[in-house]
Image (tube, rainbow, N blue to C red):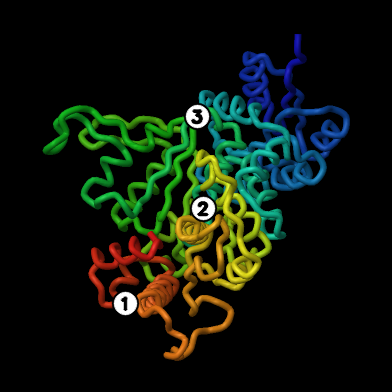
Amino acid sequence: MSPRQKVLIVDDEPDIRELLEITLGRMKLDTFSARNLGEAQALLGRETFDLCLTDMRLPDGTGLELVQHIQQRYPQVPVAMITAYGSLETAINALKAGAFDFLTKPVDLPRLRELVTSALRLPAPGGASTSIDRRLLGDSLPMRNLRKQIDKLARSQAPVYISGESGSGKELVARLIHEQGPRANRPFVPVNCGAIPTELMESEFFGHRKGSFSGAIEDNPGLFQAAHGGTLFLDEVADLPLAMQVKLLRAIQEKAVRSVGGQQETVVDVRILCATHKDLDAEVSAERFRQDLYYRLNVIELRVPPLRERRDDIETLASHVLKRLAAGTGHPPAKLHPLALEALKSYRFPGNVRELENMLERAHTLCENRQIEASDLRLAEGNCTAEAGVADLTRIDNLEHYLENVERKLILQALEETRWNRTAAAQRLNLSFRSMRYRLKKLGLD
């Protein structure tokens, strides 16, 4: 029979300690109690614990000090903070310090049991590194640091704001945080906030009841209900209209949603991860994004580096893409000519990894004898190390290809200047969105 898991309870109120001891005892857990910071540190030095529950206010210190102590000396032990009702700032500080999650007083027992069960499912620190290495390719310093941060954030329930340019891999990072954490066996629900029509947003997020509006022919659960017990990934969260931001904030705060046409709220347990290629600070300053929602979503920021900041990874990434393209064809992967590899390393990649994949897929189709030459890549000159100047007409041997490169350069420049916002880029180039979409597809940039 496996030994029972052990939980350290730290609180100076006897009633709270007794409540927690009884509740956890019924969960077949062994409990040890401490009345203050000193007693807790002494117990940690003598016993091996699987979880710590601590009050924020202690007679000789704070729960934050205990979180920091455990993070430094016993990083394998998750810590949950118990705070006074309404002390949101305290709870956020605890999450930033490395706490797994938080509870508010008076303690809600079903929520306590849910938190404890989730915390005890955590894998050992670093145990998932092999899986992350296999899917998040690259051995550059920025990528090694990113993998370490993912491993750490997977051991928390803190909301994470994943920042980074379009095509840099933000959704993959969100999936890895989910898959390495205690919610791995529950749903991961990604949603592109910019792709949902405004009039359908509330129904999509919170669900609707039959007959609540024209076309509602049956009850339909929303994204929050679909993600219950798991993770809801809000991609391009900056695209949410202000009215929807208010409703989203309330759902996060109350941990409950009310469907359109419904009379009662439904409790939901989801971890929120969000991302956008926009500068959220600038969106808040411009009053396009609510500051209170920003603080709830941006408890911890995780930046995904653009490809140009990790050029040493380009060869590894290219090799992986070419192997994938060759899979099932019966032929070995195409090879990159040394000059083609150098051309890739000198390119700025405004579309990041996604652009590299599109570029190699096109070159793989165009190349001869399964060797990709620099010319097969059709790089936009303005995004290479040497800026393109006025064309030398004596060097133009194919007018169609030259004009295509000019068009690609101008479109990529507009996309980069608008942080890859296609609508804004189309307006800058005086194109309709439909025309922009056609050109992106034609040039292999979609």
Query: Which of the 4 image quadrants contains residue 73?
Result: top right
Residue 169 x, y percent position in the rendering: 52, 53
- Callout 1, which amino acid? Arg
Residue where numbered disc 1 is placed: 428
The residue carrying pointer 2 sits among few (fewer than 14), some (14 to 19) or many (20 or more) residues within 10 Å by Cα, namely many
C-beta proximity under 8 Å, tags 2 and 3: no
C-beta proximity under 8 Å, tags 1 and 3: no
Picture quarter with the C terminus: bottom left
Query: Which of the 4 image quadrants contains residue 315?
Result: bottom right
The residue carrying pointer 1 sits among few (fewer than 14), some (14 to 19) or many (20 or more) residues within 10 Å by Cα, namely some
The residue carrying pointer 3 sits among few (fewer than 14), some (14 to 19) or many (20 or more) residues within 10 Å by Cα, namely some
Residue 351 x, y percent position in the rendering: 48, 64
**Residue positioned 64% across, 24% down in the render:** 20
In the rendered structure, which disc, 2 or 3, sits on the residue that comes first in sequence?
A: 2
In the rendered structure, which disc, 2 or 1, sits on the residue that comes first in sequence?
A: 2
Q: Is residue 164 visible?
A: no
- The correct choice, above or below, for 192 with respect to 446 in the image is above
Query: Which of the 4 image quadrants contains residue 185?
Result: top right
Residue where numbered disc 2 is placed: 170
Residue 260 x, y percent position in the rendering: 23, 37
Seen from this angle, which residue lies furthest left?
Answer: 214
- Callout 3, which amino acid? Arg
Work out how far the residue at label 2 is from the one at label 1, CA to CA, in angstroms: 26 Å
Q: Is residue 205 visible?
A: yes
Residue where numbered disc 3 is placed: 186
- Callout 2, which amino acid? Lys
As rendered, which of 90 and 142 lies closer to the eye?
142
